Image: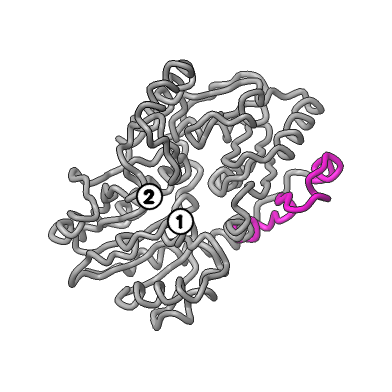
Amino acid sequence: MKKVGIITHYYGSQNYGGLLQAYALCKKLNALGYDAEQIQYIHKDVGEPNNAVRKWSTNRIANALKIRISRVKEKDFFSNMKKRSKAIEEFRKNIPHSFEIYSKDTISQSNDLYDAFITGSDQVWNMDWYDEAYFLKFVENKPKYSYAASVGTNELTTERKKLFKENLMDYTKISVREKDSVELLQPLTKVEVQYVLDPTLLLSKNEWDEICLGKRIQEKYLFCYFLGEGIVERQLAREYADAHELKIVTLPFLNGQKRKCDEKFGDVKLYDVSPGEFVSLIKYSDCVFTDSFHACVFSNIYEKNFFVFPRSGADKMSNRITSLITLFHNQEKFCDSSEKQSMKYINSIGNTPIYRKSIDEEIEKSIIFLKEIKD
């Protein structure tokens, strides 16, 4: 049985979509007969996983004195962040992962433990967060693969193209999550760059129900999952909820810090939510408003009515959403213009049917890619 090590944004991550894709890739690979696990790697901008006050991206509260003062002033906030962290860490028990926790200085030690290595999925190749470990530079004399790696943009500078060209030279097989990334990377490598699906799409609805928790909110509700700080989508959510007599259920402060946009938004604010309950909140919702790729994924898996908005401050990442909604033939769900960001437009769009045939074909292609991993 081939022992496969996967490196992605796993260790210390409190991102629901990121952890669910990590779970899905391990589950699918192991169902195919591999012995796959996530490599616990400390990305240079992560630090310790249970630090409830750190921001989930690269910016963190660095000054210890400020943290202590902030804790006194915001006792309830930090208590809620700890609840969220605890729920997420508990879910991590469902994901096979290495016993060792590696750093940049020790990651090469993992060479002896695995027969093959995989980069991905998720934004492991977003060059704003460049780390050579996500290009498997530490691997020696073992096959290197990428599965559904995301670049996070549809354009690269000359300098970044050079980095990709250098880093992709010795990959055995390469696959990416967005279709436009194929065109972006293919000129930079002799290895064929293939388009495959995000790991979360490789599991069926029944397989997701295995980790999906029961219905938590008994009233009818609109689930809002916003990673960005956009005001327009929150205002539209309020209008939509009022018009349809729905409660707004939200997960506030997803960046790990207090944000004004979240303080007064939502009727039901939840903190102690695991990735399994994140799936549940989508499954049992009447509608979903989001700016998240993976919230869109699960809205489609459970055939929910949903609307997705460009994430404020992340304009270059819209290619991820475009690639996904094109796959499901529901491009009208992407409210990416002022015309579409209106109640008139939203009310004109119904819950469109899912085109299973094209999706099933892509799932099969993606599974074939995984089956071809060799030691």
The residue where tag 1 is placed is 123
Q: How is the image coloured?
A: one colour
In the picture, the quarter occupied by the C terminus is: bottom left
Task: Decide which of 360, 143 is in the foreground and name it.
Answer: 143
> What residue type is disc 2 on?
His
Q: Is residue 326 magenta?
A: yes
Query: What residue is rendered at 77% in x and 23% in y?
Result: 245
Task: Decide which of 226, 306 is in the foreground and name it.
Answer: 226
Task: Decide which of 209, 111 is in the foreground and name it.
Answer: 111
The answer to which of marks 1 and 2 sits earlier in the sequence is: 2
Query: What residue is rendered at 76% in x and 36% in y?
Result: 236
Query: What residue is rendered at 45% in x and 22% in y?
Result: 70
In the picture, the quarter occupied by the N terminus is: bottom left
Mark identifier at residue 103: none
Query: What residue is rendered at 64% in x and 47% in y?
Result: 312
Q: Position of residue 366 (x, y in %)?
A: 45, 63
* Disc 1 to disc 2: CB gap under 8 Å: yes
Above or below, comparing residue 143 to residue 240 in the picture = below
Q: Secondary structure at mark 2?
A: loop
> What residue type is disc 1 on?
Gln
- Residue 59 is drawn in which quadrant? top left
Above or below, comparing residue 279 to residue 83 in the picture = below
Q: Is residue 1 magenta?
A: no
Q: Position of residue 143 (x, y in %)?
A: 25, 70
Instruction: Report the span colored magenta.
Output: 323-349
Q: Secondary structure at mark 1?
A: loop
